[in-house]
Amino acid sequence: MKASLTLNKVSNFLGLGLFTTLKDLFTNKLEKEDFKNFLRKTIVPLASILLFLGLWHSGAKALYNTEADFKIEKALQDQGQAAADALQVCIASGESSCQPNTLPSPSQVWDSFQSLLRDHNIISADKVAFAKKTAALNKTRIAEGKNAIVYTGRPSFVDQIFRSLKTVFAGFLLALFIAVPLGIFIGLSPTLKSAFNWFIQIFKPVSPVVWYLLVFMIVKTVLIGSADDSSFTISFISVGLCSMWATLVNTAMGVSTVDKDYINVAKVLKLGAFQKIFKVVLPSSLPLIFTGLKITLSVAWMVLIAIELLAQSPGLGLFVWEEFQNGANDSNAKIIVAMFVIGIIGFLLDRLMLMIQNWVSFDKTDAI
Amino acid sequence: MNSLLKKSTYILATAVLLFACGSKESKKETTTTEVKISKTKTLDIEKPQLTFGFIKLTDMAPLAIAKEKGFFEDEGLFVSVEAQSNWKNVLDRVIDGQLDGSHMLAGQPIAAGAGFGRQAKLVTPFSMDLNGNGITVSNDVWSKMKPNVPKGTDGKPIHPIKAEALKPVITEYKNSGKAFKMGMVFPVSTHNYEIRYWLAAAGIHPGMYTKENVQGQIDAEVLLSVTPPPQMPATLEAGTIYGYCVGEPWNQQAVFKGIGVPVVTNYDIWKNNPEKVFVMTEKFIEDNPNTAIAVTKALIRAGKWLDEPSNRKEAVEILSMSQYVGAPVEVLANSMTGTFEFEKGDKRDMPDFNVFYKYNATYPFYSDGIWFLTQMRRWGQIPDAKPADWYTSTIKDIYRPDIWKKAAVLLVEEGNIPASDIPTTDGYKPATADFIDGTTYDAKDPLGYINSFKIGNKDKK
């Protein structure tokens, strides 16, 4: 009993209510009302996923046929019947040299996903081999006080996911540490608010590309003379600056709209400024701050792709860009794989924030 | 108060934990085995861990081969090679020290030392290849251009196709109110000078640069603009430009995707012209002289390996890996294995389209560098007239055959290359008239060469 309660709690916490109903289905505790619930929460999403895959499949097929027909038609016009027939045979045989290069079908994307995983295993094995090969050399180098030789191969798709997550969290923490304190000050003091208002309004809509360039100009000069790769520093600072505005604005708003009664209570109790902020102001503005942080995290994840691409910082953004540049037969499918991975991770990050919010806030109503 | 503090500590801890998870992949395993002993006599390497950059083009092949075939590791070098997004980025990252060296346009280190664009002291000890570029036009332009091209007895166009055939098309576009736009990859790229040479040889003005205006479109009949190489086909397909000059595989890609037709290769514009170079900063080679020699050694071996015809197939397989050029095997093979496909189905033999080693291709000849300087002056990128000896002294700071020679001598001692592969030269190739318009180029008379063109700046001797 206790275990099932915990399960209920956890799945509700994660916002994944469908697991509860699924569990009830198997434990035969389903009542009529629950059954409706089950339909809505499990069957409907599954059906919509299937519908989406079906539409995608037929759409991809239609695009494929359009491009194949165009190619054959063009061969017929330019080179005559024989070339057109040869091309038709070639396309039907599935040979890679003449395939139309268009939206990949769901099965192609699945194949690419698996090939990326295989590739990851190959690279992991290669890393181990490299470590073995350089172990003796590294030992002498470390003994001489030099840096050890690190792996020189390319990162795998999985490595790139982790690298992107690292960039996003570094950027997110930066945004958190800048935006929340600044937001509190602005929210508490109308003078500061009018001093900063123009600043926020102007910088909020600036595009990630411009933020990147701005950060690049500054970081490049700050780190002048150092030969280390600064692309990570540049990209996480850009991500942080790009995404902090939602938190800043929401914190300021949350703080400035704290119930006057609370503030008066704080005055009566003669709380110090520090105590007032932590005991009264922050707890009552938490819901708004968290809404801001949630937007910040999703914006950070969104702009990451563009910034990684510009900064040449390894990660999913660079992966997408390189595949676009490669223009190989499976490049489009790999891009779609990355798209889904980006989307799913974005969704999980959002759930994570919701979980933390439910955990720290006093108000236990389900925030969306 | 307490609970809030406690909770925020938890959040922070979770965040830190997640953050740490992300960096897990960089932790290394420590297992002990013996390092493979290579036959190459390794020098005392100052900096074994290196990062080199490249742009996705087939002529980056020496870097990929030196890494994949273990030539770098034979020298005791542990090299990562990273694809870069565009030539500007490559230049900045080498100058700022994020890359130890890179595959670069020959014009880039020269411009950086001659006063055009960002200034820095860059040197090249190794010339990566000869030829390897082409000019592609869109299907629409080709259909209008084709009637103007003389045909042989077999009904196929006679090559090389000259820009005279393009001239009426430009007029037609202009009359319908469209400026004729073409793409090249960088203001100081070989491609910019080649497409300008090709156009100007037919009397089409490609536009001038001045000190104030570095767009390069003054008086232009064809507006040239910069697009990074891998994006050329997509930009052509989108109709932003009507043609482009770019390295392989991006001309063959246009043929495969059916979006354009290559009309001329740079082999036809200038036979065995110098193309990419390998660039390091002057500071790097001064601080790490042995490393620079070792890198050059590995690259020379890679060039030699690439020019064995039997190895080209394997080279294509390596280049088609997604971390290198990444284009499909068929596209890469089209130009790498001795052929070049123009119009779809019109595949012609081009045995010297990609030269990595033959004709002393790896030796950094001063005369090759001076050609770029003359073109920079011709189009106004070097705004002021310079005396003839300026050309010589400028190039001698940038092209470093001394490093190449040291590396080659070591390779001969090790038996990796025959002694006959080291040219006896003062760094100048003999005067040549192997150009599409038959103009003679003598690197010892740069001013005379600049003055021999109808279109472009002229200097008093």
Image (cartoon, rainbow, N blue to C red):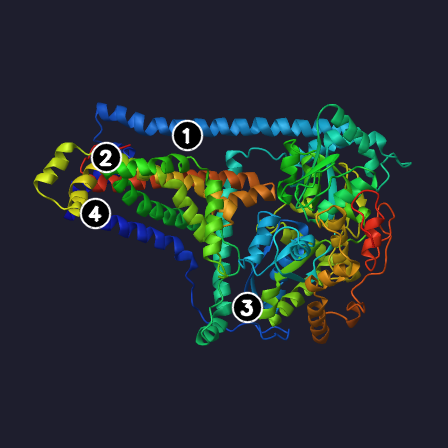
Q: Given the image, on which type of amino acid does mark 1 rest?
A: Ile
Q: Is residue A284 left or right of residue B85?
A: left
Q: Earlier in the sequence, mark 2 or mark 1?
A: 1
Residue located 42% across and 35% down the image: A205
Quarter of the N terminus of chain A within the rendering: top left
Up/down of B281 relative to A236, above or below:
below
Instruction: Look at mark 4 in the image and give the residue it sits on.
Output: B7
Instruction: Look at mark 1 in the image and give the residue it sits on.
Output: A49
CA–CA distance between discs 1 and 4? 37 Å
Residue located 34% across and 51% down the image: B18
Instruction: Look at mark 3 in the image and give the residue it sits on.
Output: B48
Residue placed most toward the observer, A347 or B56: B56
Residue placed most toward the observer, B149 or B163: B163
Residue A201 % position (x, y): 38, 34
Q: Are marks 3 and 1 on the same chain?
A: no
SS of the residue at dot 2? helix
Q: Are marks 1 and 4 on the same chain?
A: no
Circle 3 packing at 10 Å, graded few (<14), some (14-19), many (20+), is many
Circle 4 packing at 10 Å, graded few (<14), some (14-19), many (20+), is some
Residues at marks 2 and 3 touching, judged by CB atoms closer than 8 Å:
no
